[in-house]
Image: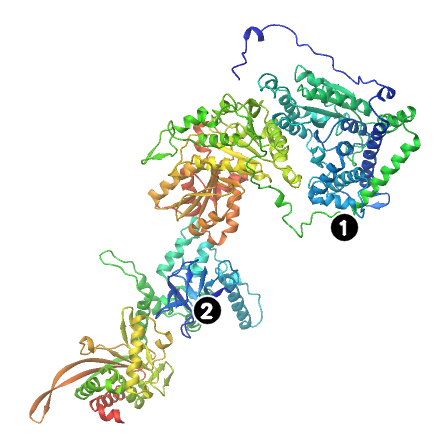
């Protein structure tokens, strides 16, 4: 809702027509003689060679999967092999004009794209560039394997090709000498030095991530374009539509500053092999009939959509050349519908029950490897013998790398016997990088001129002064603490951007960001569409390209909308890349209250369950600022949970107040908020304040002194303080607003039970929210843990309190009953 | 290298000691001679000094813990050293293993003895106890089966054990496993520190059964208190004394004979020593020393009074191990002058002084608190004229020494006064009849009245 755009009823209520331009279908019609002007003989032949390499590479995989051997050499490969035999022309055609600065992102069926893009990059790079990359990647480990006994580097390009093919195959076979140490595998192999970015086993998963990479290129004014290679089946995925829409947002045209104007430099490239697994997209599972039509639904430019004949490499080359130009003119995004066909099944186990032999045969007859070769021979560009020689060379090359890749001695798997933590150590990068790049931070005003900064200056940075609570209006609140940390980083890290729904003019739904707009240009701080999937996915793409980003989900309940992006993408790419990629993303997630079943859920447990995410939940201004600073200093994805109940609290635990300067609260360290000796209460998030109430009652009414530990972080978590406390008190209650079942509260309790068993005077008791829907605000006290719940739980489960009359039933029988009913 | 500090074995019969105070904290630097901790047995208190210097790396027992002797109490070494070998778990485990092995030896044909069950509740009796309470019970040596559960769902929790510790006898760690096997364990009376049940008690209970009168005694002790007085907790020593005195009266047939003797001679002798003793290198020899000397010699002629009475037999000792009752701040203590009959008066005097002093300081070696064959107790210095001392079983006699009063005696026609010192002999009529006891007194009286000659003997 930027004020500069006037929503004029007289304009928007006028009658008229939405007009569409024609969308080209296979309009390429040049003869090979006409193309001689654009391609040398070498170029023509190299196109054939690249297609042949891909074909042989995948043929090898097919044979290994179906016969257990290749050229008589046995190998058992039980993993996935989604082959693209038949689609080679589209991959080679796309890669032809791309260099290392152009990024491609792929799908589960991207072996061909990796090889084509790699071969194209090798073709364009100098020997020294190639050697530099090969020698430095994993300290030259892959190079060492392919170089073998060769003593001279006479043919660096050939060496680089071997490097590429071997790195990819070893990765597919899960070897430690693969591009990602075998942690990515067939569906995720990638090699960023050649501009090959992660392939994604989630259909359409690359759309949003690639869009984020394009955002990175635009914001940081980098060379090159980005291509999301996804299939026609992915047009059924919401996140793909979200990504296309976000890439085409009007604000790029109308609101972003000069120099940053225009849609994102991205091609949503649909390799349209006409089947989503077995579902026939045109005619069965979709309604577009011609996929390129969808472009017309996204923006007035219709995403410059067209259908290209993916069986003709020259047609694809032509299309990419034109589209790349459009992107370089800041007129993106582009949609390409590259029509193709896979001869092989979805996977080797596919019986092709969904298509006829006649259909497959008809396409095989038009196999691009045969058709293109015929064209070359007919046009007298190359002889049959020359092309046969290429096929021979190709087979030898593939056989050589196959031999290396199946050899357990030169291509071992990650040794988890010798180093059991090898994968664990890759889950987080745990680095401290103040700014992802050096450079000027683009801001609109000096930090001290920021109106919010000036307003905060007048605030009192402690919650209690002279024994009295400071009024909400005058106190430095938790929301101010987050703001301070965020604003500060914007003036330090030039790559830092932040976005989410209603972030800019509104200042975020809960006024955390109020004032940021005054300091930051659009390209660093903007409103995202209501597209949680695209918000998170783009943050993933932005970070893996080298930037730092704060994305925001307005409510924890919306995590469901970004499920794949949080759980499969954000969490996993650092480890799946074997540490090649960093993921400096802070995802702010606000937990609601008062707004019922879909706006008041604490979903921290979902986050904590997924390996690869750091999860924090500060409950005080001091901790909020310190944890945000720590999160923004790190290189790992941090899910930063906030509670709408406590945005306005002042600092109660640090009498000296929240420091104005920079400090960090280490992620993973709980904090003793109140010392005590009779019972430990471990609290996660906003329940801290209800726990304080409970402690007061325990002290005054029952003479029991409670030690309160604020978890602050959920992942990672250092148990030392908690165990120390439990050893002292012998009793512990774990509480938080998450629904009790399968929660991290249970996880805490279980771990404490395990580690402090001999010291416990009662089982660790969990007081979480009910396993219900969150009811109306007026009924929330029956749903979320309250002070009296904690006291009742102590009385019933840990130590009976003299004269206590319970209101809630925490007995074992009740627990059994509830569990039986699933509530 | 890290050096473990073990709980010293203060005497042959000591099974465990209680740590009363830590003078150092974990992490403190210690020098040789620094006091690490204080501890006490049932009869005496000690300080453990550091024998090496370094950093106190670990403390395995807290104040109030009952520590089996020879267990590692703490470790001194250099910062950062690996001390994982010293932890009590390691030792406890090996202890447990050892005792298991022994059990196997004792049991004829091996039923598989499960160590957990051996220490656990009686089979068939549902008993819930928190791990913390169970550990505390094990550490303190209390029988958690006697705790009244106040936790949720009838679980015994920490506070129940603490309550039990305050009100009930506890067992030493080495006695615990056997003790838990007893069926009527709750009637057993402990004779160890603070009434702790020792292996001896358990053995006793196993063979002789539980005595009814002792159960009564327990009940009386446990009666609830009223409000118009101050309740003080008995010290360990007080409890031991109480039990020992009561048992003495309950289990023997005591009676006391009184007499007095003319102390003129020993007073003169003492004066002489006082005046000239220093020159001869003699210390201050007290009247009590003189009596001790006389008793140690006289007893040899009355062996049934230098004896232990053991129900069906008596042990008549060849030497006189003379118990000397000492009044200390902590209560009555009775150190022993071994083979007093072979020592000179001066030696007896020196030994008595040394023993009395270390009793009063609380540093007496417990081996000196046993083994007596006859006891001398002196209330004369407090002006008591006659009293009935209580036997120290299984000894058969105890001599009370009284104050000196002026008495008159007829010498010719004249009544003259002389200093008379009273003697009260309590003896066990089961072991000795009245006449032999009286003869002992008579001979003692003669010896004291003619001390110079006696000394020359």
- Local crowd at mark 1 within 10 Å, few (<14), some, or many (≥20)? few
The residue carrying mark 1 is A409
- Mark 2, residue position: B70
B409 relative to A27, above or below: below
Disc 1 on helix, strand or loop? Answer: loop
Tell which of B387 and A288 is nearer to you. A288
A144 relative position to B19: left or right: right
Observer-nearest of A343 and A496: A496
Q: Is residue A621 left or right of residue A356?
A: left
Query: Which mark identifies residue B268?
Result: none
Q: Secondary structure at mark 2?
A: loop
Report, in whole angstroms, how far the alpha carbon at label 1 lies from the one at label 2: 56 Å
For disc 2, the neighbor class at 10 Å (few under 14, some 14 to 19, many from 20) is: some
Q: Give x and y (percent) for residue A464.
A: 35, 35
Where is residue A807 shown, x and y percent of the image? 40, 38
Q: Position of residue B366 (x, y in %)?
A: 37, 74
Identify which residue, B107 or B277, lies in the foreground: B277
Task: Verify CB contact (< 8 Å) between mark 1 and mark 2.
Answer: no
Determine the chain carrying the residue at label 2.
Answer: B
Of all chains, the one bearing label 1 is A
Q: Are marks 1 and 2 on the same chain?
A: no
Tally the numbered discs: 2
Q: Residue at x 83, y 34 (%)?
A: A55
**Residue A233 against residue A806 in the figure, above or below:** above
x%, y% of residue A106? 71, 31
Residue A51's quadrant in the figure?
top right
Residue furthest to the left: B413
Tell me if residue B181 can be seen. Answer: no
Is A48 in front, or is A730? A48
The residue mark sitting in front, 1 or 2, is 1
Does residue B407 appear to the left or right of A299 in the view shown?
A: left
Q: Quadrant of residue B31?
A: bottom left
């Amino acid at each position: 809702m930027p004020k500069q755009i006037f929503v004029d009823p007289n304009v928007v209520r006028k009658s008229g027509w939405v007009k569409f331009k024609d969308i080209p279908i296979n309009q390429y019609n040049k003869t090979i003689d006409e193309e001689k002007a654009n391609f040398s003989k070498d170029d023509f032949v190299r196109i054939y060679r690249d297609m042949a390499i891909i074909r042989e590479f995948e043929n090898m995989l097919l044979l290994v999967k179906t016969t257990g051997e290749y050229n008589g050499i046995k190998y058992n490969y039980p993993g996935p092999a989604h082959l693209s035999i038949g689609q080679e022309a589209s991959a080679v055609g796309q890669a032809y004009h791309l260099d290392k600065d152009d990024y491609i992102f792929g799908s589960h069926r991207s072996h061909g794209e990796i090889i084509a893009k790699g071969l194209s990059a090798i073709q364009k790079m100098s020997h020294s560039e190639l050697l530099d990359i090969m020698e430095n990647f994993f300290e030259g480990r892959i190079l060492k394997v392919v170089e073998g006994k060769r003593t001279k580097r006479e043919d660096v390009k050939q060496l680089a090709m071997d490097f590429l093919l071997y790195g990819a195959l070893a990765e597919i076979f899960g070897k430690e000498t693969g591009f990602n140490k075998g942690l990515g595998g067939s569906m995720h192999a990638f090699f960023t030095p050649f501009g090959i970015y992660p392939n994604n086993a989630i259909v359409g998963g690359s759309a949003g991530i690639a869009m984020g990479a394009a955002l990175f290129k635009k914001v940081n004014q980098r060379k090159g374009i980005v291509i999301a290679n996804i299939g026609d089946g992915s047009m059924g995925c919401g996140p793909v539509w979200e990504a296309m829409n976000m890439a085409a947002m009007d604000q790029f045209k109308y609101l972003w500053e000069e120099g940053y104007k225009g849609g994102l430099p991205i091609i949503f490239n649909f390799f349209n092999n006409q089947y989503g697994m077995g579902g026939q997209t045109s005619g069965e599972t979709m309604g577009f009939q011609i996929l390129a039509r969808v472009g017309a639904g996204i923006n007035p430019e219709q995403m410059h959509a067209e259908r290209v004949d993916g069986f003709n490499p020259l047609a694809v080359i032509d299309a990419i050349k034109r589209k790349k130009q459009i992107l370089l003119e800041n007129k993106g995004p582009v949609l390409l519908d590259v029509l193709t066909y896979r001869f092989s099944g979805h996977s080797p186990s596919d019986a092709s029950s969904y298509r006829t032999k006649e259909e497959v045969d008809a396409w095989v007859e038009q196999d691009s490897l045969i058709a293109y070769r015929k064209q070359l021979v007919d046009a007298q560009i190359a002889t049959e013998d020359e092309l046969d020689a290429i096929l021979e060379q190709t087979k030898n090359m593939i056989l050589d790398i196959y031999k290396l890749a199946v050899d357990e001695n030169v291509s071992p798997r990650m040794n988890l016997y010798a180093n059991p933590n090898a994968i664990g150590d890759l889950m987080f990068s745990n680095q401290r990088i103040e700014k992802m790049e050096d450079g000027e931070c683009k801001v609109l005003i000096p930090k001290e001129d920021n109106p919010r900064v000036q307003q905060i200056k007048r605030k009192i940075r402690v919650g209690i002064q002279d024994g009295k609570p400071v009024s909400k209006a005058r106190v430095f609140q938790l929301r101010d603490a987050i703001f301070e940390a965020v604003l500060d980083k914007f003036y330090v890290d030039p790559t830092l951007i932040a976005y989410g729904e209603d972030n800019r003019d509104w200042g975020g739904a809960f006024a955390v960001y109020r004032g940021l707009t005054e300091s930051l240009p659009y390209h660093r701080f903007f409103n995202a569409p209501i597209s949680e999937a695209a918000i998170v996915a783009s943050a993933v793409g932005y970070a893996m390209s080298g930037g730092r980003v704060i994305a925001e989900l307005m409510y924890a309940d919306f995590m469901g909308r970004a499920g794949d992006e949080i759980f499969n993408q954000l969490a996993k790419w650092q480890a799946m890349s074997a540490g090649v990629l960093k993921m400096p993303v802070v995802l702010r997630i606000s937990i609601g209250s008062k707004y019922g079943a879909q706006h008041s859920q604490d979903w921290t447990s979902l986050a904590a369950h997924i390996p690869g995410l750091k999860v924090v939940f500060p409950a005080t201004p001091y901790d909020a600022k310190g944890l945000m600073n720590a999160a923004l200093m790190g290189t790992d994805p941090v899910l930063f949970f906030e509670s709408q109940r406590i945005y306005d609290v002042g600092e109660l635990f640090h009498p000296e107040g929240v420091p104005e300067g920079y400090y960090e609260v280490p992620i993973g360290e709980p904090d003793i908020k109140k010392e005590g000796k009779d019972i430990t209460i471990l609290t996660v998030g906003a329940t801290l304040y209800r726990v304080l109430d409970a402690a007061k009652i325990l002290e005054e009414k029952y003479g029991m002194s409670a030690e309160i530990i604020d978890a602050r972080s959920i992942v990672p978590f250092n148990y030392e303080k908690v165990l120390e406390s439990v050893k002292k008190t012998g009793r512990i209650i774990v509480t938080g607003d998450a629904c009790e079942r399968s929660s991290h509260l249970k996880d805490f309790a279980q771990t404490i039970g395990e580690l402090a068993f001999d010291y416990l005077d009662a089982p660790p008791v969990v007081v979480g929210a009910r396993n219900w829907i969150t009811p109306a605000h007026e009924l929330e006290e029956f749903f979320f843990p309250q002070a009296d719940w904690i006291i009742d739980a102590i009385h019933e489960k840990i130590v009976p309190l003299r004269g206590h009359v319970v209101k809630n039933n925490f007995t074992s029988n009740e627990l059994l009953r509830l569990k039986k009913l699933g509530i | 290298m890290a050096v473990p500090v073990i709980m010293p074995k203060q005497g042959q019969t000591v099974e465990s000691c209680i740590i009363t105070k830590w003078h150092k904290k974990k992490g403190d630097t210690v020098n040789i001679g620094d006091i690490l901790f204080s501890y006490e047995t049932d009869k005496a208190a000690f300080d453990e000094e550091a024998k090496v210097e370094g950093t106190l790396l670990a403390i395995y027992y807290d104040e109030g813990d009952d520590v089996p002797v020879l267990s590692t109490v703490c470790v001194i070494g250099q910062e950062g050293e690996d001390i994982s070998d010293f932890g009590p778990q390691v030792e406890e485990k090996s202890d447990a293993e050892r005792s298991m092995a022994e059990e196997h030896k004792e049991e004829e044909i091996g039923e598989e003895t499960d160590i957990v069950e051996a220490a656990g509740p009686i089979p068939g009796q549902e008993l819930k106890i928190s791990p913390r309470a169970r550990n505390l019970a094990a550490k303190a040596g209390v029988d958690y089966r006697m705790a009244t559960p106040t936790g949720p769902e009838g679980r015994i929790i920490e506070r129940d054990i603490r309550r039990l510790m305050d009100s009930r006898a506890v067992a030493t760690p080495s006695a615990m496993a056997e003790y838990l096997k007893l069926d009527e364990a709750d009637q057993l009376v402990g004779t160890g520190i603070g009434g702790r049940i020792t292996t001896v008690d358990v053995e006793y209970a196993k063979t002789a059964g539980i005595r009814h009168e002792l159960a009564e005694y327990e009940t009386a002790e446990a009666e609830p208190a009223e409000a118009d007085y101050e309740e003080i907790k008995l010290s360990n020593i007080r409890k031991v004394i109480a039990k020992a005195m009561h048992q003495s009266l309950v289990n023997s047939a005591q009676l006391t004979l009184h007499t007095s003797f003319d102390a003129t001679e020993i007073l003169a002798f003492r004066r002489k020593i006082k005046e000239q003793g220093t020159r001869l290198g003699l210390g201050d020899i007290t009247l009590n020393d003189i009596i001790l000397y006389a008793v140690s010699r006289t007893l040899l002629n009355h062996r049934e009074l230098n004896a232990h009475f053991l129900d069906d037999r008596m042990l008549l000792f060849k030497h006189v191990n003379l118990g000397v009752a000492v009044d200390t701040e902590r209560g009555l203590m009775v150190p022993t002058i071994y083979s007093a009959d072979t020592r000179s008066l001066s030696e007896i005097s020196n030994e008595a002084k040394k023993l009395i002093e270390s009793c009063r300081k609380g540093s007496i070696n417990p081996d000196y608190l046993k083994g007596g064959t006859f006891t001398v107790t002196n209330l004369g210095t407090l002006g008591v004229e006659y009293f009935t001392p209580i036997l120290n079983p299984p000894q058969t006699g105890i001599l009370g020494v009284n104050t000196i009063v002026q008495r008159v005696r007829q010498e010719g026609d004249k009544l003259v006064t002389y200093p008379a010192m009273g003697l009260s002999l309590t003896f066990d009529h089961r072991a000795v009849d009245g006449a032999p006891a009286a003869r002992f007194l008579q001979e003692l009286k003669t010896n004291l009245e003619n001390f110079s000659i006696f000394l020359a003997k």
